[in-house]
Image (spheres, coloured by chain):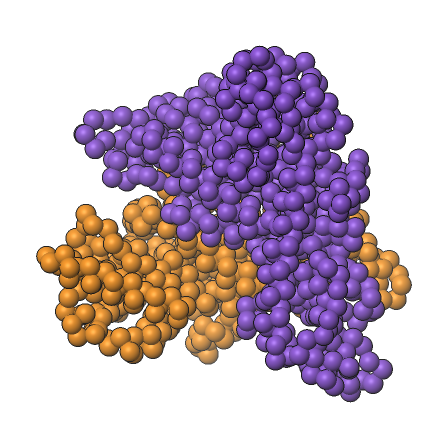
Chain colours: A purple, B orange
Amino acid sequence: MQERNILKKYGESFSEWFEWIIREAEIYDYGRYPVKGMGVWLSYGFKIRRHVVELIRLLLDGTGHEEILLPLLIPETLFRKESEHVRGFEGEVLWITRGGHEELDVRLILRPTSETALSYMESFWVKSYKQLPKKYYQIVSIFRYETKMTKPMIRVREVTTFKEAHTLHEDFSDCERQVVEAIEIYSRFFDRIGIPYIITRRPQWDKFAGALYTIAFDTIFPDGKAIQIGTVHNLGQTFTSVFDVKIQKRDESIDYAWQTSYGISERVIASIIAFHSDERGLILPPIIAPYQVVIIPIPHSDNAIFKMINEYCDKIANILMQAGIRVYIDRREDMKPVDKFFEWELKGVPIRIEIGYKEIQSGIVTVFRRDTMRRKTVGVEELIQELKRCLDEISYGIELRAWSWFKSNIRVINKFHDASKIVKNEGGIAILPWCGNEGCVHKLIESEEGIEVLGEVYKDSLARLKIELISIETECGFCDKKASTFIAIAKRY
Amino acid sequence: MQERNILKKYGESFSEWFEWIIREAEIYDYGRYPVKGMGVWLSYGFKIRRHVVELIRLLLDGTGHEEILLPLLIPETLFRKESEHVRGFEGEVLWITRGGHEELDVRLILRPTSETALSYMESFWVKSYKQLPKKYYQIVSIFRYETKMTKPMIRVREVTTFKEAHTLHEDFSDCERQVVEAIEIYSRFFDRIGIPYIITRRPQWDKFAGALYTIAFDTIFPDGKAIQIGTVHNLGQTFTSVFDVKIQKRDESIDYAWQTSYGISERVIASIIAFHSDERGLILPPIIAPYQVVIIPIPHSDNAIFKMINEYCDKIANILMQAGIRVYIDRREDMKPVDKFFEWELKGVPIRIEIGYKEIQSGIVTVFRRDTMRRKTVGVEELIQELKRCLDEISYGIELRAWSWFKSNIRVINKFHDASKIVKNEGGIAILPWCGNEGCVHKLIESEEGIEVLGEVYKDSLARLKIELISIETECGFCDKKASTFIAIAKRY
């Protein structure tokens, strides 16, 4: 099975492969910048990031979210207002204590997230239910002083691509509606970039500091570990009550507003890299590929002919651009075509077009598909149609392959000790029947080092995974009570 | 003269007006966030910012610049490597001294600019003249612990929209070529958003800390003060020699590479607001307006007719969108059309379309131009053509008006004491004949509080300003030597 091969191929050395590919493909330079947990987005990587950010914006703008930008620095006085939040973040914030040659009166933190800064401003902005719901978002750097081992894009001290959305509502039920909307938006987002996921409700001991509850999206990396790639929090009135965000309600009474927040980070880009790749390098989803097509002119010993070849490349590139396809002509003179092929295969360009004298003579081009590694010739008059079909097939194909591998790494297992053994040996996620009592899970999980709870599996997610649940006995996997739902466990990043 | 009126109208209270308009038009919330010199970009302002950023990207990507993203934090050890640079910035950097509960071993600064961070990385990236020139840029927040009075977007502690470009070259002459390219790019950029400018070479005492020399773009604000809106630095080998960025040259010798850097900030957005406005609010240049056209449906007592009106609005909006025009239908139900008119005039939407029953019956729309405040009716079949013509006229008109006002505030004056008196009383920029010796200027400027040197006026800039230079005597405005060039002075932000 091809799916198994991927897991084996990256195997124990997935981290090593990951660090190699992101540098080699000029995505992200990590480990050389002299601050632990901070890296540099390189030109090609930044272009991927641009398209990912544009996709996020499209989905959020289209659902009535307003993009804003809050200050990076939060004064200690604001940060300390909500005690549960402080407890959750205090151990990992970076502190500014000096400005120029002066000691600061009020110390400042670099935002680890923006609930406190925004709630403070919302107390000025929002007065009436008529203004609600309000949906804000920003795409910014956040900072966490990680003490665990850092990993590029995955566990860093500067998360340079953090999209945080924050919403305000009249009541609890509208918060609940917003949580559903957020889950739909993220599902659509991950579907568009072909990243498979499982949706769970985190146990209380693992929710966001200050939330009523947290819903999380996790995927599985080739090393078999689960990784959180998105979260949605129902914040209730935690922050609005502390920051005095009061609204006049429909019945003219005054009450604190209700909030949700939800975030995704550059871990989605790490996921694209982890999933959409093979032994030759990346296979980028066309929707976020910096170039969807690269054109390579094949040199010719006759200069006049080579000039014609280059002009033909221009002509083809123009036709593609007019059709809305992102195209790049690689004209580097000091490099053989075969080396260019190799480089663009590594960088994951979905389609390569080769144009030499033969192609000009016959009014064709040679089209190479990165996912199948197959070449064919296509007439110019049918080129656009053929390329669009190929790009669609590539998008669909890599999504299908990713989901198929993901599903093959999710197993339904009846009892915790069997499940934890299998997860330890084979990786992936185990789903167990569950009585719904977090106490019975917490006790057993604590005793098994390296295994963690993802949470109660969201119903739609079970359906999407099409997991065979019929054979499950009705006893909880952690105690002898009757099971009423399902819970997921895994090794985690 | 209309131009004079603008200066008078904002007069002494320009600051007040500016703070009022940016909050009222929902651009930037300033003065309420509890950290001095930091504000919040609001939704409408963020959209303006997005289009400004896209325009910058278009111009830089189109000239071979690569967008990257460096870490925000620079370790003290890196920052301290270049002594002149440290002296220039030390008094105004923010220091991180703690992470979580730990004291940091190496303190970190928030980037005030990125020459040190990037030069360090370039020592890994660049090895040969074959890779050069290299042109990088990033659009990021920078931090300066301003001790002067802060002003929104103009003098802040977090500059949230700082575009810094950094280039690498084989030799000095290629640096000089790059300086010219940078000046051309910025000129094109300011021309596209209709901001007039004068280009000067800053005196040595006012150059960027670490540069061989600095070229600056200044404009004039309605209060008569000059404001720096862009700078271009020839950095020579200052940073490459300290950070060991060595390259193999054409003749196979090894030498340090050469650098330039150039930056613009959100002051360009402040300039758009300052220039393109009148007593009713903003008049945004169509190229960066969040909405180029707003459609207001005019309510009707008959619900069936009002439904038709709304459908007609949809139809018109679709036609506009297909023609690439950014359009918004303002359907708010609890607001009278006249209040909507007022709000969108304040927010500077270039064109408003009003659609009521009358318009449907005759197959027309009513088109209102923000710049002339005039209405006319246009047939649907000629609408797109008419709108595009109007948008072009508005763009051209506001640029023309801005330059005309700017020129009327630049005066050629022979002697320093006359010039400084006029600048003090009337504001604007004075241009004086000059011998070219910075010493004679420095002494006199020091004695005149509030007057500063912009620098030697760039030749092309003199030509662009079409200033009458014939009548100038050939004696320097500061001493009795012979003048060989021109220098500009002003009150400055």
* Residue A329 seen anywhere in this rendered image of the structure: yes
Residue A479, above or below B73:
above
Which residue is at 76% across, 45% downward?
A: A1
Q: Where residue B461 sits in the image (x, y, percent)? A: 51, 70
Asked whether, in this view, residue B397 is left or right of residue B178, the answer is left
Q: Is residue B119 visible?
A: no
At a point 58% along the width and 50% down the height, the residue shown is A193
Q: Is residue A492 left or right of residue B349?
A: right
Q: Horizontal and vertical percent for residue A268?
A: 60, 43
Is residue B287 rendered to the left or right of residue B201? left
Q: Quarter of the image holding residue A396?
A: bottom right
Residue depicted at 59% across the width and 25% down the height:
A472
**Front one among A105 and B433:** A105
Residue B77, horizontal then vertical, whole percent: 72, 36
Residue displayed at 29% across by 66% down:
B315
Vertical placement of residue A317 versus B154, above or below = below
